[in-house]
Amino acid sequence: MGGWRGGVESAWRSLLTALLVSAPAWAQETASPEESSAEASPSPAEPTLIAEALPVNPGTVTRPASTASPAAAPEEPTPKPKVEPLGESLSATEERATQREVRVFGRVFARARADERTDYARTLSIPSARVGVGASFKHLEAEVTGDLSSKNILKDAFVRLANEKKSLRLYAGQFKAPFLERTLESSWDLPLVSRGLVEDYLTETHQLGGRRLGLMGEVRLKGAWNLKVSGGLFEGSEDELGKRTSEDAAARVSVRPFKALTVGVSSYMVQVLEGVPRHAVAADALIKLGALHVSGEFVRGQLALGPFTAQLGLLSYELPISQEWALQPVAGVEALQLRGDVTGRGWTTVGGINILFSDFFKAQLQAERGLRPGDEVPATELSFQLATRF
C-alpha cells in the first residue's frame, strides 16, 4: 500500500511539472479559431477610404469623419476580475465560461507572528506559495496545483465533468471533501490569517475532511432555492502505525432561499465501510448584506476521545477608501468542547484590520486571545500577513 501511495504521489509530481512547463505554449494553442481569423483579416465594419480609389482635386483635403485624432491614446482593455481556483473554492467559479481556456495562477502568503506562549518570540514563515494550471472546456475542467512551501507539494489535481446545463457534475482526483464550511472557504476570501482553532483541531489533528483523493458527484438546481447536493467517497487517513484505513465518506447540502442568505448542512464519516468509528455533522449559515458578511457554524460528532461540540462565528465589513483601496475590520469567536470520558474545552477570540488593494493584494494585522489544546491559561498571539495573487 505504501509503495502504491508513493507511486501515485510521484506521478502527480511529474504531471504538475509537465503542466507548468507547457502551460504558456498550451495557452497559445487554445486561442479560439474565431479570434485568429479576426486578427488575420480586416473587419468588414472598418470604413473604406474612398479617397484611395478616386482622384483628389489639388488643394482639397479629404479626411474621413471617423478617423481618430493621432493624439488620442488607445483605450486600455479592462482587466478581468480575478477568480479563485476551483481547488480553493469549488463554488467560487460556478458560471465559468464554456469556451476553451487555459490559465496559470498563483499566490504567496508571507506571515510574521509573535506568541505569548513563547514569550513573544517572533517567527517568520511562508505558509503558502502556490502555483497551478487550470483548463476549461465545454463539459470538462481540470486543475493541478502545487505548494512550494509544503512538504507535500501536490495540493489539488482533479478533473470535473458537467452536463450542458451544469446541473450535474462529477469530480475525480484530489480536492477538498465537502465538509465544514470554514474548510471549504477559499483562504484568499477568508478574512482571517488562519482558519482557526476548530478547523485545525478537526481537520489537521483528527483528519476529518480536508484535501483527499476521491470521487464525488454534485447536483445543482437553481430553480429550487439554488439547491446544491454533493457527496462522495474519499481515501482514508493513516492510523497510528502509518497504515492507510478504508474509505471515508462526505456529503453536503446547501440552499440559498434569499440572495443574502445561504444555509447548509455537511457531514464527514471515517471508515464508512467499517462501522464509522469517528464522524461529525455541521450546520452553517452565511448572511451577505452588501459589504457586511456574517457567518456561523455549529459542529458536533464523535472523536477517538469521545463526543464533542464546536461553534464558530465570524463578522467582517468592507469600507471602501478609493476605487481600489479598502479597509476590512474583522472579528471572530470559536469554542470547542470535549464531552466524553476525556473532557476539555478551548476557545479563541480574534480581531483585526485588513487592508485590501484591488483584488490581488492584501495586508492583514490581527490579534488572537484564546485557550488552545495544551494551554493551561489563555494566551495572546499577534499576526501580520502580506498576500498577493496572480
Image (cartoon, rainbow, N blue to C red):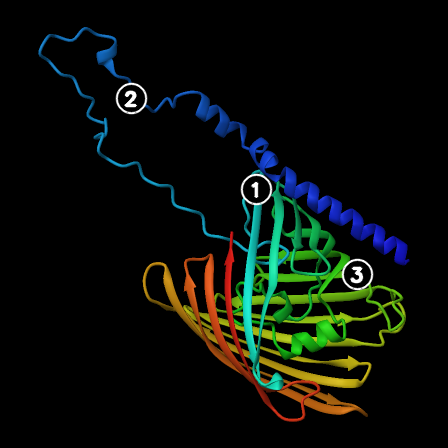
Residue bearing the label numbered 1:
98
Query: Does dot 1 land on a helix, a strand or a loop?
Result: loop
Measure how far apart labels 3 and 2 are at the Cα level.
Answer: 60 Å
Q: Which quarter of the rendered picture does the N terminus lie within? A: bottom right
Relative to 321, is 33 above or below? Answer: above
Residue 139 in sight: no
Tell me whether the residue at label 3 lies in contact with that at label 2, contact meaning CB atoms closer than 8 angstroms: no
Q: N-terminal of the two: label 3 or label 2?
A: 2
Q: Position of residue 299 (x, y in %)?
A: 67, 79
Image position of 95 (left or right of 43): right
Asked whether disc 3 touches disc 1, contact meaning CB atoms under 8 Å apart, the reply is no
Which amino acid type corresponds to the residue marked 1 in the rendered image?
A: Thr
Question: How many other residues sit within 10 Å of disc 3, few (<14), some (14-19) or many (≥20)?
Answer: many
Give neighbour class at mark 1: few <14, some 14-19, many 20+ (Cα, 10 Å).
few
**Residue annotated with mark 3:** 233
Mark 2 to mark 1: distance in Å? 33 Å
Marks 2 and 1, the one that precedes in the sequence: 2
Residue linked to disc 2: 47
**Circle number at residue 109:** none
Percent across and percent down for residue 183 are 64, 68
**Residue at point 20%, 22% (across, down):** 64
| Residue 30, x across and y down, in percent | 58, 33
Res. 175 image quadrant:
bottom right
Callout 2 secondary element: loop
Name the amino acid type tagged 2. Pro
